[in-house]
Image: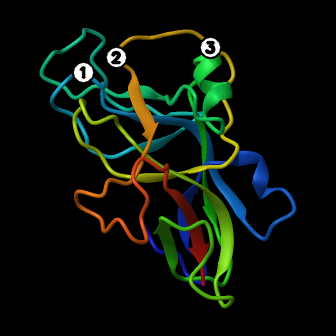
Amino acid sequence: MKKLPMLHQFTCDGVEMIVGTTLSLYIRGITAGANAFQKGGGGNFLCMPNNPIYATTEDAPNNDRAKLRATGLFGNLFPPFQPLYDSREDITCAVCRAPRRSTVLMVPGRNLCPTEAWTLEYQGYLAAPRITLERAEFICVDNSPEGYPGTAGHRPGHSELHPVESECEGLPCEPYVANHELTCAVCTI
C-alpha cells in the first residue's frame, strides 16, 4: 500500500458506498486471488482494475506461472453473503483514498472503530478461504457486497472467500462465542 501525501489508499469492498462520503475512488474492479485448489500463487487478494494495461506478453499458457482468478463469496445459510452465493457472482472492489487521513485500521471482531476520533469507512464481516484450502489473508468484506456484472455461474477453482467464525480452542470462550461469524470495520484517522 503506497502512502500518498495527505491521503491514504485502502481497499473498500462496497463500491456504491463511496457516494455521499469524503472518499475518492482510485480503482474500481473485480476482487481476485490464487486458484483455490492449487498450491502456489499469491497469498493475498487484489482489486484488479476494469482497464488493465499489458506490456510484454506471451500468448501460450505456461504452467510455471502463477494464476490469478476472480473471487467469489461462499457461505450459504449466512444471510449477508447469500445473494452472491446464490447467483455465483464474483465480488466487485474499489481502492479508495481518504483525504487528510493518514492511517487505516481494519478492526477484526468489531464493527465499530476504536474511538469517536476515527472515521468508519465501512463495516462488514471477516472473510478468508475455507479451512481446507490454502491460507490467505483475512479481509473485511462489506455488509452488502456487490456482484461483478457478467460473472454469474459456477467456475470451479476460482478464488474463494468464506465467513470467519470464532473457535474457543484458540480464542477465549469469554468474550468470544464459538461458531459465531466475526464482524469487522475499516476505519481511518
The residue located at (25%, 8%) in the rendering is 60
Mark 1 and mark 2 lie on one chain; the one further toward the N terminus is 1
The kind of residue on which mark 2 rests is Gly
Q: Tell me if residue 67 comes above or below residue 123 in the rendering.
A: above
Q: Residue at x 23, y 57 (%)?
A: 169
Q: CA distance from mark 1 to mark 2?
A: 6 Å
Q: Residue furthest left?
A: 64
Badge 1: few (under 14), some or many (20 or more) residues near its Cα, within 10 Å? Answer: some
Relative side of 58 to 73, left or right: left
Residue, disc 3: 152
Q: Secondary structure at mark 2?
A: loop
Q: Which residue is mark 2?
A: 157
Q: Is residue 142 visible?
A: yes
Q: Is residue 131 above or below residue 6?
A: above
Viewer-proximal residue among 70 and 171? 171
Q: Amino acid at mark 3?
A: Ala
Label 1, secondary structure: give it.
loop
| 2 or 3: tag closer to the N-terminus | 3
Mark 1 and 2 residues: CB-CB less than 8 Å, in contact? yes
Quarter occupied by residue 148? top right
Task: Identify which amino acid the numbered label 1 is placed on.
Answer: Phe
What quarter of the picture does the C terminus occupy? bottom right
